Image (cartoon, rainbow, N blue to C red):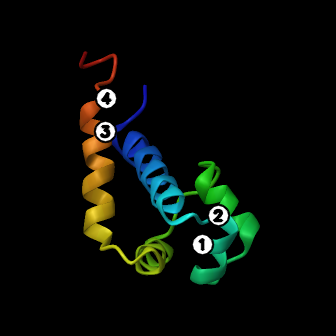
Amino acid sequence: MTTYGDRFEAAMVTQIKVELVERGWEQKDLADKVGINRVTMSHYMTGKRSIPMPTFLKIAEALEVTPGSLMDQADARVQARPTSETA
């Protein structure tokens, strides 16, 4: 059973990937702008590691979006996709 938190975290990564595509950026571009190692960014984007809040805030800043807008869009993704327990 996955929790809301698990689904939200996956949706957040999906939203960050959407933002990258919209800008024509790759993960390495975002890693460079945020100032983190490219392998670390890859771990965040594949779900191997959770994104720490300070890094999440830097990601939002680099993407020039508010952290709240990223979170709202991630939440909308979670709400649009009901789990088998609630479907």
Is label 2 in a helix, a strand or a loop?
helix
Q: Looking at this view, is 19 or 43 the one in front?
A: 19
The kind of secondary structure element at disc 3 is helix
Of mark 3 and mark 1, the one earlier in the sequence is: 1
- Image spot of residue 28 (x, y percent): 69, 69
Label 1: how many Cα within 10 Å (few below 14, some 14–19, many 20+): some
Image quadrant assignment for residue 39: bottom right
Q: Are marks 3 and 4 in contact (CB under 8 Å)?
A: yes
Identify the residue under disc 1: 30
Instruction: From the image, tell me which residue sits under label 2.
Output: 27
Q: Earlier in the sequence, mark 2 or mark 4?
A: 2
Q: Which mark is residue 81?
A: 4
Query: Which numbered disc, 1 or 4, marks the residue that appears first in the sequence?
Result: 1
Mark 4 element type = loop
- Residue depicted at x 59% and y 82%: 33
Q: Which residue is found at the position 32% from the left and 41% from the top?
A: 77
Q: Marks 1 and 2: CB-CB under 8 Å? A: yes
How far apart marks 2 and 4 lie (CA) works out to 26 Å
Compared to residue 84, the image places residue 45 above or below, namely: below
Residue ID for mark 3: 78
Residue type at tag 4: Arg
Q: Which kind of residue does numbered mark 3 sit on?
A: Val
Instruction: Say whether residue 82 is left or right of residue 11.
Output: left
Q: Give the label on residue 57, or none.
A: none
Image height of 35 relative to 9, above or below: below
Q: Tag 1's secondary structure? A: helix
* Residues at marks 3 and 1, CA–CA distance in whole angstroms: 24 Å
Height in image: 31 above or below 20? below
Mark 3, other Cα within 10 Å: few <14 / some 14–19 / many ≥20: many
Q: CA distance from mark 1 to mark 2?
A: 5 Å
